[in-house]
Image (cartoon, grey):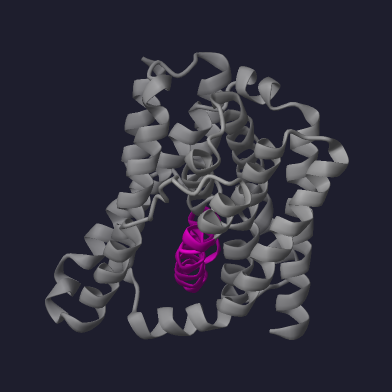
């Protein structure tokens, strides 16, 4: 009953995405998630639909400008994070597949990258769960921490959007943090993050070769194409303005519900199963990518 009431509360639009995550964490560790086995699929579908909806509030020309600005940062951060993650995993003696999943989740787009890479390296359920646990824990912290740091450093909306798209793992937390910072930050963050998500494909192919699993299929994030279509309609079809604001509002409610469900899946058992070494690997990679991206944006952008 508590879960149902809070779900309805998230659907009202009066709850912000960070508050949705916080309510989910409370539910997970007090009353529990009654539909935990359906959580991963539900959050994945909700996030994709919400991101597509956000496209109806964005302009193609602005998005292309944002994409160009984030390209160099994206390439440099992805490959430096993957290389550093490999060596940290060896240093901490973390199981190779677990370390690689955490590195991919940090480098590209969190849980989506892990879900795409896991079948390529044929990881077992525990290895995948540990990697997802690390990413979701750090995502939850980032959603609250990044806007505070952004305001403290007086970052512009463009700077903050670029920073959180590079340094926050999962698309849900990137959009949640950027939405809290402002509309320009949201547009920059969403565009750069989704462009970054396309790197799942080359990274998965490189992974298949390095793990000698050439027969594995790569999951392509097709919803990004629908997000681009939504932007095109919003930019070039004037009639879209009649429904666009409503769709964007629904998308933001969907994002709040997504974060509530993610929080509701992070109970104490999940946190306990992660282990210290994988968590330390995730923290070190996160600090590296967050600090390097921030310094690059402030001094070289």
Q: Position of residue 152 (x, y in %)?
A: 74, 64
Instruction: Identify the residue at the far left of this view.
Output: 239
Instruction: Identify the residue at the far right of this view.
Output: 91
Q: Residue 94 in magenta? A: no
- Front in this rendered view, residue 272 or 16: 272
Q: In the drawing, does residue 100 fall left or right of residue 189?
A: right
Q: Position of residue 261 (x, y in %)?
A: 44, 33
Q: In the drawing, does residue 15 fall left or right of residue 90?
A: left
The answer to whether residue 297 of the structure is visible from this angle is yes
Q: In the drawing, does residue 271 fall left or right of residue 213?
A: right
**Residue at image location 57% in from the left, 73% down from the top:** 157
The quarter of the rendered structure image containing the C terminus is bottom right
The quarter of the rendered structure image containing the N terminus is top left
User: Residues in magenta?
Assistant: 174-202
The answer to whether residue 13 of the structure is visible from this angle is no
**Residue at image location 64% in from the left, 67% down from the top:** 163
- Front in this rendered view, residue 251 or 290: 290
Q: Residue 198 in magenta? A: yes
The chief SS type of the magenta part is helix
Q: Position of residue 81 (x, y in %)?
A: 71, 59
- Front in this rendered view, residue 253 or 205: 205
Q: Position of residue 116 (x, y in %)?
A: 47, 46
Check the image and report above or below for 229 versus 33.
Answer: below
**Residue at image location 53% in from the left, 45% down from the top:** 213
Q: In the drawing, does residue 92 fall left or right of residue 186?
A: right
Check the image and report above or below for 287 versus 295.
Answer: above
Q: Total label count?
A: 0
Check the image and report above or below for 89 versus 56.
Answer: above
**Residue at image location 38% in from the left, 19% down from the top:** 35
Image-quadrant location for residue 140? top right
């Amino acid at each position: 009953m508590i879960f149902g009431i809070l779900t309805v509360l998230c659907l009202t639009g009066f709850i912000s995405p960070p508050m949705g995550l916080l309510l989910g964490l409370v539910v997970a560790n007090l009353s529990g998630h009654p539909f935990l086995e359906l959580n991963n699929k539900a959050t994945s579908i909700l996030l994709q639909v919400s991101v597509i909806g956000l496209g109806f509030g964005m302009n193609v020309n602005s998005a292309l400008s944002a994409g160009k600005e984030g390209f160099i940062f994206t390439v440099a951060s992805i490959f430096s994070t993957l290389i550093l993650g490999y060596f940290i995993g060896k240093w901490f003696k973390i199981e190779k597949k677990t370390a690689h999943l955490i590195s991919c989740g940090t480098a590209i787009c969190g849980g989506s990258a892990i879900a795409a890479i896991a079948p390529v390296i044929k990881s077992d359920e525990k290895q995948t769960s540990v990697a997802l646990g690390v990413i979701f824990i750090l995502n939850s912290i980032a959603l609250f921490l990044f806007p505070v740091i952004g305001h403290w450093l007086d970052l512009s909306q463009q700077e903050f959007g670029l920073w959180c798209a590079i340094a926050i793992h999962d698309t849900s937390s990137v959009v949640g943090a950027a939405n809290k910072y402002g509309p320009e930050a949201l547009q920059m963050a969403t565009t750069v993050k989704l462009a970054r998500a396309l790197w799942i494909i080359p990274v998965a192919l490189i992974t298949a070769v390095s793990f000698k699993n050439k027969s594995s299929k790569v999951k392509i994030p097709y919803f990004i194409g629908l997000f681009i279509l939504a932007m095109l309609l919003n930019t070039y079809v004037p009639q879209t303005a009649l429904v666009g604001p409503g769709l964007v509002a629904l998308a933001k409610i969907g994002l709040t519900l997504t974060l509530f469900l993610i929080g509701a899946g992070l109970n104490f058992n999940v946190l306990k199963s992660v282990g210290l070494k994988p968590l330390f690997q995730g923290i070190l990679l996160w600090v590296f990518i967050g600090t390097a991206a921030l310094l690059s944006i402030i001094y070289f952008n």
